[in-house]
Amino acid sequence: MVRFQLGFKCLLVLVSLLFNGLAIADDANVTWAQLTDSQRQVLNPLASEWDTLRPWQREKMLDIARDYPKMSSDKQERVKKRLANWSRMTPYERENARKRHQRFKDLPADKKNELRKKWHEYQNLTESERAKLRAESPDTYGDADN
């Protein structure tokens, strides 16, 4: 009897996991028209391409939309700006951005901090100083403002 109950509980857990997995898959397959008004408002820069995004991309964007109301206003603005920038990128530019992000994530903490410091210094330059740097070193600064 105990063995049967244990088996039954395991079966219930497996069925539960299966349905949770299906729910996640369904979320990833939701069309633009099926999004809520609040989701569409946050994800609006991606409206024209939403229905062509891969399931894992939709999941990630839905997570952002879910967390958006809980974000500070600064973080919300950053999310809006990044989504707008992302929506204007070509697939090639997006792939390069993913690769750069992954390389950055793989760096040791001290290197990350050094790069953040340099980025902050670059952001504080005037536009003419930035343009000069981009002209002198296009490989380094060519896409720094994107």
Image (tube, grey):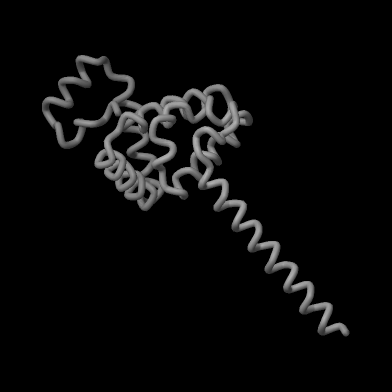
Q: 61 above or below 23?
A: above
Quadrant assignment, res 4: bottom right
Q: 101 above or below 75?
A: below
Residue at (33%, 20%) from the top-left corner?
124
What x and y, as percent, mark residue 99? 30, 48
Quadrant assignment, res 115: top left
Q: Is residue 24 left or right of residue 11?
A: left
Q: 124 above or below 106?
A: above
The outermost residue toward the left is 136
Q: Nearer the viewer, residue 95 or 5?
A: 5
Q: 9 above or below 105?
A: below
Quadrant showing the N terminus: bottom right
Residue at (50%, 34%) from the top-left corner?
32
Quadrant showing the C terminus: top left
What x and y, as percent, mark residue 9? 78, 72
Residue at (52%, 47%) from the top-left corner?
28
What x and y, as percent, mark residue 17? 66, 62
Q: Nearer the viewer, residue 132 or 13?
A: 13
Q: Nearer the viewer, residue 66 or 125?
A: 66
What x and y, as percent, mark residue 112? 37, 43
Q: Is residue 93 left or right of residue 11?
A: left
Q: Nearer the viewer, residue 75 or 27?
A: 27
Residue at (49%, 30%) from the top-left corner?
43
Q: Is residue 1 left or right of residue 25?
A: right
The outermost residue toward the right is 1
* Total residue callouts: 0
